[in-house]
Image (cartoon, grey):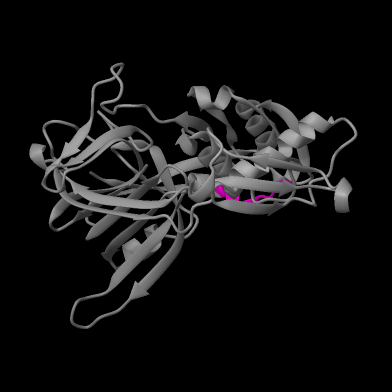
Amino acid sequence: MQIEIYCFTAKERSISAELMAICDSFSSLLWDVEYYECGCFEVYIAANAKNVEIFRTGRIIGRNDDKEHFGIIESVQIDTDAENGDYLTISGRFLTSLLSRRIIYPSFSAGNTFENIVRTVLSDNAISADIRTIPGLSMGTVSGDCWQSRTRLQVSYDNLMEWLYTICETIGGSVNIRMEGNALKCDLLQGTDRSILQNDNPHIVFSDSYNNLLSFSYAEDISVQKNFAYIFGCGEGASRKRATYFSGTEPSYLDRCEVYVDKRDLSQEEDVSDAEYTELLRESGAENITAPKTASESTIAAFSTQYQYNKDYFVGDYVTVKHKRFGLIQSKIQLVGMIESFDQNGRSLTPTFKI
């Protein structure tokens, strides 16, 4: 595997990406792909005049075996050590972080599919936005039924990237910006169910019985759970607009964990009916529902003959994890992150799962 370093030149609405160097002499590489947040990377390499010249902030890092993820060098640190030698630490986030440079301005309010809402917001704030345009950016592919569900949203001045990942977590989708020649393509994605609870796709099962689950940790915390929301909108006193939200069957008694959501800043536009405004309040309530906190991390076999990462399964997919020794089985759990690590010991994979 080799690292590719590109010089990224912006010319108003277009970009030019020139391959500057190919490197395979790094001491270590961390490549962290995430589903509900922007991924990141870190390169550790010997410091010399050539590498200091190549690895500059603002340049783009890619891999010759991964054409979906590219990173922006955001930090370069030089450390000198008479005993261990001089080293560079280069780090940054993937290209989706470009969206964090914009806010949603002015306010946006509309009812449509999530795909069309995202298309409009991106166009108004990053694609066709005069001097606010991110050069070279356009919509790429859209895959997954989650993006076709409908909603009504109102948003003002939120950070564009953070808002988009909030949408992703709400509907179970993800976003990724990749480099395609001299263009930046923004893809909207949805993971695939590869768990044992379905029969449309080959099953992906990680288990100590199969020798592909090398280590495993799991934790659950119910103290943060909120499953019933009271949402209060515009107005004062008894005339204040209000709604409630819960998912599925209304929780009751000891299973009910309530939360108050203050949305007095959510105005009701003239073209928004009472029913549509109530739905806006309910959407805000949904964003404040908190499931029991679970954390599941593992180390899986990087060179398994059963399944290959980024070929048989991908970040965002639903898989099955079994731990025979403890009698634990997670029949359908989402792979929400994967850290690939390359160093003197070879390649390792550290996944993060979310129920």
For residue 84, side relative to residue 65 (left or right): left
Report x, y in % for residue 282: 68, 39
Report x, y in % for residue 3: 30, 48
Report x, y in % for residue 297: 28, 51
Report x, y in % for residue 133: 68, 42
The quadrant of the rendering that contains the N terminus is: top left
Position of residue 348 relative to residue 86, above or below, is above
In this rendering, does residue 297 appear at all? yes
Q: Residue furthest front?
A: 253
Q: Residue furthest top?
A: 200
Q: Is residue 215 or residue 280 the one in the foreground? A: 280
In the image, is residue 291 part of the stretch drawn in magenta? no
Position of residue 37 relative to residue 14, above or below, is below
Q: Residue at x 18, y 32 (%)?
A: 307
Q: Residue at x 79, y 45 (%)?
A: 106
Q: Residue at x 87, y 53 (%)?
A: 237
For residue 8, side relative to residue 120 (left or right): left
For residue 284, side relative to residue 297 (left or right): right
Q: Quadrant of residue 92?
A: bottom left
In the image, is residue 101 part of the stretch drawn in magenta? yes
Q: Is residue 41 or residue 108 the one in the foreground? A: 108
The quadrant of the rendering that contains the C terminus is: top left
In this rendering, does residue 10 appear at all? no
Q: Is residue 322 or residue 135 the one in the foreground? A: 322
Q: Residue furthest right?
A: 270
Specify start and end residues of the magenta stretch as a single range: 98-104
Q: Residue at x 77, y 31 (%)?
A: 276
